Amino acid sequence: MKPGTTRAMEPTKVRAPNIRDVARLAGVSYQTVSRVLNNAASIRPSTRQRVLEIIDQVGYRPNQAARALVTSKSRTIGVLLSQTAHYGPTTSLRAIEDAAREAGYLITTTSLSASDYESVAGGLEHLMSQAIEGLVVIAPQVRVFDAFKELALTIPLVTLDSTGTDALRSLSVDQILGARLATRHLIDLGHQEILHISGPQDWIEAEARMRGFLQEINAADLPTHPPILGDWTAEFGYHVGRELLGSRDFTAVFAANDQMALGVFHAIRDAGLDVPRDVSVVGFDDIPEARHFWPPLTTVRQDFAELGRRSIALLLGELEGETDLNHDSILPELVVRDSAGPIR
């Protein structure tokens, strides 16, 4: 270095605390710290408290990869997610992540590019390569579950599947009941000519909601109009609403989700009509924006967060060898607002 020049000061690298640092500060062996981290029953309460205090003080974070090598457990749960980004699945995923983190587990997620066998098998292979201990499936298409029937899994599995075809592995909100609540509400308001705009044909929830609608219509001995297959979007609700309003042979619409209901609102307004004076509308899901529609949307609320929390509780229960696990459906709730009114 030439005289008169100075060398730029290099930033000091700060090493993250490790398990031996914690052991030294707590006055115990690193094996004791490891046993505390793994909730071993043989540790004295005072020792456990001292170690946990030091961990909190120094900000120690266990190395999951190293722990997996020692314990042969990754403490990782996989989530196989449909490529959809709808409000419901994303809300459940956030709750799954929070519940898993609270229990000391990591979440690794793979989104399916399609719902065919090859995509499902490829997504599952990717998750299994990360040594996941359990799996949650949030992919509500029929073909996804058809593929799972052919795949041999040796880890605990929970499917958010509203068909209930696999009672020992599935968990869901009761979609059929939700659709019946929505339809019954319109019937109780005096409506007899009720249309149903359903979701896509391959979607399990769409099929269940369609079944609930038809069951309630038949129970009331009302005219049955063939359900209209939609695609979950407000754009579809708008265009099909414009077509339907050309005949005006109905007084109410039950849309299989809130986005399609929003599109129907738009079509009714464009036709110079009023909700609910001319046409009553009920949706499904209770997205956060539903109460801000004009008028505020009557809809069926699903507790997506509870669905996510319970899926993790079921997985952890199975991992711990519990046999009395609760797979009961979560009950939906009809949220009555202003978009459905008495028939004129």
Image (tube, helix red, strand yellow):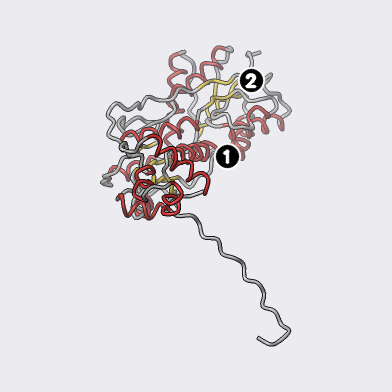
Residue located farthest toward the bottom when viewing the structure as drawn: 2
Label 1 to label 2, Cα distance in Å? 22 Å
Q: Position of residue 21 (x, y in %)?
A: 45, 54
- Which element is circle 2 on? loop
User: Is residue 118 visible to us here?
Assistant: no
Does residue 155 appear to the left or right of 240 in the view shown?
Answer: left
Q: Is residue 300 above or below residue 11?
A: above
Say whether marks 1 and 2 touch (CB < 8 Å): no
- Check the picture and name the quadrant holding the N terminus: bottom right
Q: Earlier in the sequence, mark 1 or mark 2?
A: 1
User: What residue does disc 1 label?
Assistant: 233
Residue depicted at 59% across the width and 13% down the height: 189
Q: Position of residue 239 (x, y in %)?
A: 62, 38
Badge 1 density bin: few <14, some 14–19, many ≥20, Cα 10 Å: some
Q: Quadrant of residue 322?
A: top left
User: What residue does disc 2 label?
Assistant: 337
Residue depicted at 48% across the width and 50% down the height: 60
The three-letter amino acid code for the residue at tag 1 is Thr
Q: Position of residue 241 (x, y in %)?
A: 62, 32
Residue depicted at 66% across the width and 13% down the height: 344
- Tell which tag, 1 or 2, sits nearer the viewer: 2
Which of 303 and 340 lies nearest the eye of the viewer?
303
Which of 234 and 271 lies nearest the eye of the viewer?
234
User: Is residue 199 visible to us here?
Assistant: yes
